[in-house]
Amino acid sequence: MMRPSRRCAASSPGWAWPDRSRSVGRRALPPMRPRRSLSEVTGPDVREWVSINGLLMPADQARVSVFDSGFMQGVGLFETMRAYHGRVFRLAQHVQRLARSAQALRWTVPPDVGRMTTCVEQVVGATEQADARVRLTVTTGTLRPTDQEQPELTIVASATPGMQYPPETYAKGVTVVLSSCRQNPFDPTTGHKTTSYFARLAALREAHARGAFEALWFTREGRLAEGSISSVFAVHDHKLITPPLDTPILPGITRAAVLELAGRLGIAAGEQAMTVDDLLAADECFLTNSMIELVPVVRLEREPIGAEKPGELTQRLAQAYRDLVRQECGDE
């Protein structure tokens, strides 16, 4: 049972909800275009690559129709992945998640897992970066009122140099704030990575403007959901907890890996609803996503969490995650 937070009983708490509240919320596939060799497309300094429906090219040559549904209506899904030494960590899980989202959102033409995987492998194979940020974006293609047939999906994969966070992010931990946005369970896109991402980016921008690393989203009932771009974990009395998937939240790939690692390490772990007070009463807290891996959280607004430094379980799990990456992706 979670212990009550003594800090929250103070007459003038260090945190407060932001003053704004918003809700966020079959025809045969054509063949893949022939893969072009690197000698056909490479220049002397190409660092960023794109594959559009199987056609590999430098990023500055990439073109998508202005009538594409991703541009015109924001109808699209995406995955952000991290490649280590030429291998994407948990690639299969990422493309399968996107395919499940398309099914849940009732796309009439389902994305093909094999085609998506091929596009990602193309750009990862082309990049020479040891650490790369890989994005897969799939839209429903060009939609026009007069179209009688379903359009071909647009599948775009890109690889860019990975973002390196300062060492103190992991050594000292970060501050998070309360987002003024609310997780909306009635929005059918909640829990899916859609290209309609404005609210998420606005919340993250708000956090950065306030000197914080991330903004945490809660439901209208005050239950913790997730970060703008991350999953959230807390440690209470040596037990690792994270919000339930049916909050609803995105089923994070790194989130799932951390729960898997907790089981291997003999750490008690499970899903549990949390409030602001529960977070403030936590012994430890951390964020996860593919790019940041595990980042310790030591402050919520102006209030400390735990000892206000990265906790023991957080560090154990972070090391176990790095070991898992080396095991699955190699180290050279």
Image: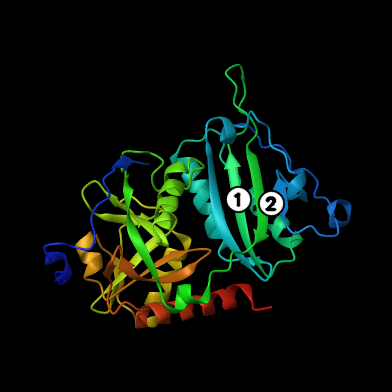
Q: Is residue 101 visible?
A: yes
Q: Position of residue 195 (x, y in %)?
A: 52, 42
- Quarter that holds the C terminus: bottom right
> Which quadrant does the N terminus fall into?
bottom left
1 or 2: mark nearer the eye: 1
Mark earlier in primary sequence (1, 2)? 2
Give the camera-side residue of 261 and 130: 130
Kindly tell me whether residue 192 is visible in this rendering. Answer: no
**Callout 2: helix, strand or loop?**
helix
Residue 119 got which mark?
Answer: 2
- In the rendered view, does 125 fall on the left or right side of 104? right
Observer-nearest of 329 and 291 = 291
Q: Residue at x 33, y 59 (%)?
A: 177
User: In this figure, what is the number of numbered marks?
Assistant: 2
Give the CA distance from mark 1 to mark 2: 8 Å
Q: Position of residue 256 (x, y in %)?
A: 43, 65
Q: Is residue 161 left or right of residue 197?
A: right
Residue at image position (29%, 52%) is 218
Task: Place residue 260 in its image quadrant.
Answer: bottom left
Name the spot of residue 28 as percent of width and height, x first.
65, 35
Where does label 1 land, which residue? 136
Query: Which amino acid type is shown beneath numbered disc 2?
Result: Cys
Q: How busy is the neighbourhood of tag 2: few (under 14 within 10 Å), some, or many (20 plus)?
A: many
Residue 29 picture quarter:
top right
Q: Is residue 63 left or right of residue 254?
A: right
Residue 77, numbered label: none
| Image quadrant where residue 237 sits | bottom left
